[in-house]
Image (tube, rainbow, N blue to C red):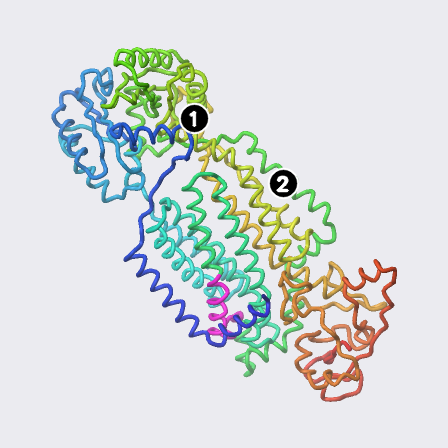
Amino acid sequence: MNHLLERLGSFAARKHWIVIIGWVIILGGLLWANGAFGGKYVNNYTVPGSDSSNGLNVLNADYPSQGGYGGQIVFHARHGTVAQQQTAVNQATSNVAKLSGVTKAVSPFSSPHSGAVSKNGTIAYSNVTWSDNPAGLTSSYLDKLNNAVAPARKAGLEVAYGGGAGQIGQQTSDTTSELIGLACALLLLLFMFGSFITAMVPLVSAIFSVGAGLSAVGLLASVTTFPSVAPTVATLLGLGVAVDYGLFLTARHRDQLDRGMDVVKSASSAESTSGAAIVIAGSTVVVAILGLYISGVPFVGAMGLAAAVVVAITMMAALTLVPSFMGLVKNNIRSLPARVRAHRAGISAQEQAKQTAVATEEHHEQSGFARWGRRVARQPWPWGIASVLVLLVLAIPLLSINLNQPDNGTNPTSDSSRRAYDLITDGFGVGANGPLTVVVKLPKQSGSADQSLLNKMSKSVADTHGVASVSPASLNSAKTVAVFNAIPTTRPQANATTTLVHKLRDDVLPQYKETSYVTGTTPGNVDFTEQISSRMIWLILAVVAIAFLLLTTAFRSVVIATKAVGLGRQPDRRAHHIADPGLCADDGVRDRLRPVHGLRGVPALPGARGLDLDPRRAPQCRDRHRRHRAGDHHRRRHHGDRVLELPPERPVRGEDAGPRHGGGRAHRRVAGPDDPGARDHGAARRARLVDAALAGPRAAAAAPGRQRSRGGRIRGILRGRRAPAQPARSIAPLPPARPAGATSPSSPAGDVALA
């Protein structure tokens, strides 16, 4: 893989205009295709096989007028009563019934005992049913709804939309937040690199890749179903990995340029090293995010599929577009002061980098990050224990987390859904915001027997603790399905409401042999939350197992994989409840706290797991390769009484590459003094071995010769043979020939090669 990536990076850097134009064509074509043939995003929050889903299916099949997705249009008379404006209310309800997608709209005055008018007569509501989830309807549909209820507003009534109706046209645009995020990323990269060109390389690549990925998701939406939140989640993860992967390559490329490497060679080297880490990281994120299908909720899995598509395209863009930008900007990717110094000296940027390579390396070794790393490495146990303790403290809120779907009472008071919630609470009680719909499949019997059965069931439900009232039952024309509503005494998000749903399903309704279901928005939310909660542990285990297998396969090391997955994302529940002082106080203190949406942690878990592992790929790859090269964990090799400090970077193909043992060519045969290759290919060998003998010829003369591989030593021990001692080898002078120890004009310590 490393050789393939090296060739790919070299081609992209040399033929940068071809790659850039190719991506422009790809992006333009996908944008055009999405605009012409792209599908729509549809929200379907049902959990297949759940009690609420089965009940809804029965209604849709046998009693369509009672099925679908419900909502309320609330009318409030500031002066007088709503009945005084009955004509305007009836006209508004009739207009709503004519809107597309509406299957039923019932006026509060359609029946004297409808129960839709408050006792004081100032508040009333119409029940409206849509064939599709109203949360997916756009702002243009909201304008049509506003025009439909205009007669009621002209009559002086306040009109608000509750339930599903309050979600119409509430889709938010992510453009502003994305621009703010990109601006913050630009400022951070400018601070880190001190170069506008360097900062723009990963950002421009991110814009290309995320735009192409979202267009591809839009095309897929024409053949499969994606929720409306899918583009938001895909954009979040796509921008994150795009900037992350672009930063991997750009930082490595710039570091190598600062040591005097050629632009094309540096791009290919960065591609074969950090590019290998990107392949591993991107694969982990894609596979992990596809693990959302383990949740058992189709729309959650589809959301993961959309994010996986964007991440995969982002990974391909990082491996092709970023190297092409490197070839385009050439040495301008270096810091501005370095380029200014080269210009003043009248030399090329590459020559200036070679002259200052040792100083650059010294600067890197004395940087704050390097000092911090050495400090932690010297005392790993205290730092490790302290880190674990901090993570455990941050995870304490997980013990008291309340997973549920927040109701409309948690919305801002400026929202129409919140005003409708408060009006219904004032006029009918807080439980009227989340009625429980009981669906009964009637056996073949007489009408009187059906009525007797429904009366008994209604009375049993009404006598249940936590039920405020029960509506009269209605039957379909075939007399096979009956429906009645139970109004709880508590709000939809309250734990007592969840308990009531379980009590009706497990204790009250099973007293009767007829098949029954408890469905509606509130029971659907209960089923969704419980499904997510029950699958969460399996989702976590699956993501960890997949990441562990990928890392073990890539690095061929159980230790590295264990460290990566073991230090993964801590439970992100630090703010599990958000107090809302504007909520009603009659539900208890706990119910005034906003619960954590059951969906909120699900897409973030595999995505954050993959992104959390990403920053460890390059350090682990680099650290592993350096240990192979230097002989211990501190990047040192001991030669007798001298210590030869090796530079942290060597332009060796395969650096940071996990799949190959030791990083590609790290273990290569070293030329002997009589090997003609030592002279014929000395210039090329100089780029692969030590750039300068930092400790002088004396330390270089003590360098050991060819080492047996670790596998060979182990096999020898198993066969009862000891590994032979490694004699010191002499140093072969590089061309042009000069006496041992002679100093080259271009290097203060002399050019040497390990022989």
> Residue drawn at (37%, 18%), measured in percent from left and top?
514
Q: Residue 124, which numbered label?
A: none
Q: Main secondary structure of the magenta part?
A: helix
Q: Is residue 566 left or right of residue 674?
A: left
The image shows residue 143 at horizontal and vertical percentages of 21, 41
Q: Determine the residue located farthest toward the bottom in the rendered image.
A: 737
Dot 1 surroundings within 10 Å: few (below 14), some, or many (20 or more)? many
Label pair 1/2, CB-CB below 8 angstroms: no
Q: Pick whichever, 134 or 517, lies toward us.
A: 517
Tell me where residue 272 appears, x and y as whole percent: 58, 67
Tell me where residue 294 appears, x and y as whole percent: 50, 41
The magenta stretch is 316-336
Relative height, residue 44 to residue 329 (above, below)? above
Give the quarter of the figure containing the C terminus.
bottom right
- Please give the residue where the numbered disc 2 appears in the rendered image: 390
Q: Residue 592, which numbered label?
A: 1
Q: Secondary structure at mark 1?
A: helix
Q: Is residue 322 above or below residue 135?
A: below
Q: Quadrant of residue 106?
A: top left
The correct choice, above or below, for 42 with respect to 405 in the image is below
Kindly identify the amino acid type of the residue bearing the numbered disc 2: Val
* Residue 62 placement: quadrant: top left
Magenta-drawn stretch contains 223? no
Q: Secondary structure at mark 2?
A: helix
- Most extreme residue toward the front is 444
The answer to which of marks 1 and 2 sits earlier in the sequence is: 2
Magenta span contains residue 332:
yes
Question: What's under tag 1, amino acid-wise?
Answer: Arg
Foreground pick, 551 / 496:
551
Give residue 285's position: percent from left, percent from top: 52, 52
